[in-house]
Each structure stands twice: as C-alpha cells, then as structure tokens.
Amino acid sequence: MSDSLPLRLVLASASPARRKSLQAAGIEPDVLVSGVDESLVVTDRAEELCLELARLKAQAVLTRLSPADDQRTLVIGCDSVLAFDGEILGKPADPADATRRWLRMRGRSGVLHSGHCLIDVVAGRRAEAVASTTVHFADISDDEIAAYVASGEPLAVAGAFTIDGLGGAFVERIEGDPGTVVGLSMPLLRRLLAELDLRITDLWTKVAPGGQSVEPLGNVRS
C-alpha cells in the first residue's frame, strides 16, 4: 500500500449529527451502520462504556469492508453517554423516561463523554480516545420539558438532549469541545489521525456545484 493513495473515511454510525459535523469540517464520509447491540457492554464507568462501544462499532463495520487497491480506508466508530448524578445515561427508553431525566437535569450539570475509535483498515492500526465536555442545563419549565419531549428529539440522542437542534436553547453553557456533545470531536479526530501518521487535511474534500461529485483537496504525505 502506498501512502500516496487517496483516503476514504467510513463513519460507523447512523447519526446525522456526526455526518454533518464531518461535512462541515470538509470531510465527506461514507456511512455504514454497525448494528451493534449496545446492551452487550456493562460497566459503571461512562468513559469505559463509550470507548468500548466505539471500538465494537468500528470493528463491526471493519469486518464488512472490502478495501480497494486504489484507496486507503479508515473507519471511525463513536459512541456518547451522559454521566449525571452517578448514573450513565444513553438514549431514553421512551417519552416518560426522557421527561423524568429532564426534571432531574434542569438547572444542574453533567458530563457528556464521547468515545472515538479510528482504524486504518489495511495497515491494521488503531487510535482511540474519549472526549469529555461538561454541560450546564438551563432551569427550564415543565411546559418546556413537555414540548421538547413531544418533539421527539430527545428520544434519539444520548442524555436526552442536543446542542445542535431544539435542545440547544435548554443548555446554558458548556465547558469543552461542542463537537463532543454532538457526538464527534474534530480536534480529537485530528489527534487520532496524527497517531496514524495522517493529517486531517488529507481528508478534506470539495463538493462540486449541485453536489454531483467530490474531489480530494488535501494530499496524503508521501
């Protein structure tokens, strides 16, 4: 394999927010959903849980890939959980669960952990880490909670909130990288790429007018 080959990034996630984060950063990923059963990992440490799930997602997608001779393929798996009041909170089970969470979280704070596992498919190398950001929730009213839960948004995300959607109005401030809360930290991805002797600029792409084609902007170092 030559280091001059163009890079392909496969996102092992169905999350539209993660894909949009990559696209906003100039990276056009392929998407392949892992299908990992998240209930298989049991631990009382949030950082350990999200990183192990990120590994499992990346590995599950890796086994389904057939790397091409004319590309260098990378797989990124991510998983996020909220550590709050000594509990690990993933996606709510139902609207009632989401409501209970927000009644507890309002006016308080928690830590959102996002595990990242990046695999260089052909080289068989892996880099991984957890990004953590403290989130301070607004002291919102019962009516606001009911309206937010009824929107359906909190049911689809770890911790029952987002900052890049309707939930952004209910977060007073954060301490750390906003991308961590969205589910994919670009500064951390940059560092993981460096561990694999790559630059994030190697993944930059340019979408032609109308979105008809994607051409590489960055060049992999020789």
Image (cartoon, rainbow, N blue to C red):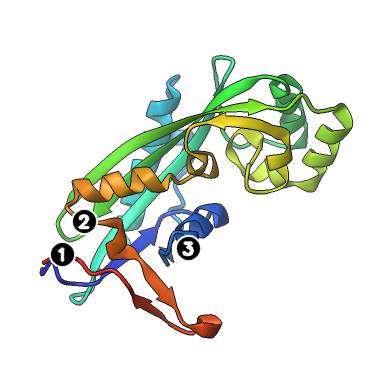
Question: How would you rate the neighbour count of disc 3 (Cα within 10 Å): few for under 14, some for 14-19, many for 20 or more?
Answer: some
Q: Position of residue 160 (x, y in %)?
A: 66, 36
Question: How would you rate the neighbour count of disc 2 (Cα within 10 Å): few for under 14, some for 14-19, many for 20 or more?
Answer: some
Q: Position of residue 43 (x, y in %)?
A: 42, 23
Label 3 residue SS = helix
Q: Are marks 1 and 2 in contact (CB under 8 Å)?
A: yes
Question: Residue under circle 1?
Answer: 221
CA distance separating discs 3 and 2? 18 Å
N-terminal of the two: label 3 or label 1?
3
Please name the amino acid that badge 1 sits on.
Arg
Q: Position of residue 48 (x, y in %)?
A: 38, 27
Label 1 residue SS = loop
Which of the 4 quarters of the picture holds residue 172?
top right
Q: Quadrant of the N terminus?
A: bottom left
Which mark is on residue 198? Answer: 2
N-terminal of the two: label 3 or label 2?
3
Question: Is residue 197 rendered to the left or right of residue 63?
Answer: left
Question: Residue under circle 3?
Answer: 23
